[in-house]
Image: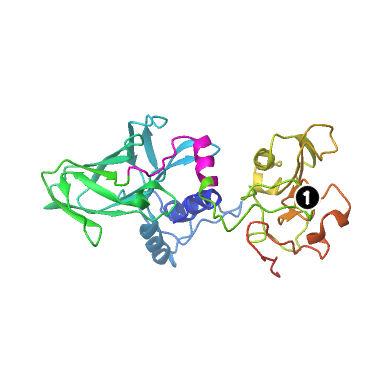
Amino acid sequence: MDPDNWYLLQPLIGASTLHLATIDENGAASMGFHLDPAILELDPYSGDFGVGFFGHVHLAASYYVHHPSHGPLCYLCDAINPTSTTNVTIFARDSMRKRVFIEPLGFFLEILAGRIESVNVNLSSQSVTVNFAKDTMAHFHRLKVRTPSLKRPAATGYRIVSPETPQSPTNIYQFPSTTTSVVITVSSKHASIKTNAGQQKKNAAATSPASSPPPRATKGCDVVYPSTLPGYSHVGMDMCGSLDLPGFEGGVAATDASHCAELCATQVNSDGWRRLACQAWTFAMAEVSPKKNQSWCWLKAGRGNAIGRCGYISSSCENRPAPASAWPCCQSGYGCPNVIVANATCGSV
């Protein structure tokens, strides 16, 4: 529904597939794995495995995405020639192999009868080709086409051009078992397309609501902040009142706020778990930075988002390279408003 929310993608993939790790080599289900160093074994009881496995089956899908930082990625799938804009072939590798989401176009394809062999993606022509596998148990192929995201080209409409098929009110289409492939294309010739990380950022900025102008730091400040701030900790997911976490603390040069957030994300502590090493960053633009003509980034463990004095953006009230008076939203403690969500405040523990 919201494929621009990249933070949620990875934990959701992990959460939706974790049940596969609680099935032993003999196929027996377990309620979980005991991490006690003295045990390190699957529990002998299945417990509520069935409920969790239902959730896994309900969510199982393969996701091909163009990540703004990492480029083309295939989650629970294999992508052949992934950087191409004219011929990307995707093979589903999730446990069900029934659903494939093509993020750059916004197509969510689901096979209801028969099997998908592969999906060819052509970003230049804004089309996908669904290749069916031979399935002697299915009398026909039944395909469901969804376009859940309003910020992707397929939201403008689609057509099945081969074999030519009229639009279905249920978005479900049935084809003879002899059909080998189906070609679906974005119907609006004016639909925009993202083929790389740079273009993706431009399109994301272009789709920002006109009614939500970028925030400014203080009255009379000429510095305009980006309309969407990158970050790995904000009031919607923070740990209010928690202790500072171990990690790198200091300043480094950075080109912009996105670079600062990425530098924060790359910090790892001794056990290699990056989220515990750095959850806060503060970025100062070059024109207001204490480093002459050099934009600067401070990194420290913390929580929350905040706008401070002119030129400063912070992901934490606990990471302010300035007096408290420069950060008015932080003076009441941990309850910084979220600069991305208007009037958001930090909840109580």
Q: Does 200 appear in magenta?
A: yes
Is residue 145 visible in the rendered structure shown here?
Answer: yes
Question: What residue sits 37% from the left and 29% below the top?
Answer: 81
Given residues 49 and 209, the one toward you in this image is 209
Count residues near mark 1 (Cα–Cα under 10 Å), then give few for <14, some for 14-19, many for 20+. Answer: few
Camera-side residue of 262 and 26 = 262
Q: Position of residue 117 (x, y in %)?
A: 25, 41
Q: Position of residue 225 (x, y in %)?
A: 69, 47
Span highlighted in magenta in the image: 189-205
- Residue located farthest toward the bottom when viewing the structure as drawn: 348
The answer to whether 209 appears left or right of 242 in the picture is: left
Where residue 328 sits, quadrant-wise, is bottom right
> Percent x, y for residue 301?
75, 49
From the image, tell me which residue sits under label 1: 221
Q: Is residue 62 left or right of residue 349?
A: left
Q: Inspect the magenta stretch and tell me whether residue 259 lies in it.
A: no
Out of 48 and 327, give the one closest to the viewer: 327
Q: Amino acid at mark 1?
A: Cys
- Horizontal placement of 187 versus 63: left or right? left
Relative to 5, residue 195 above or below: above
Quadrant containing the N terminus is bottom left
Q: How is the image coloured?
A: rainbow
Q: Is residue 95 visible?
A: no
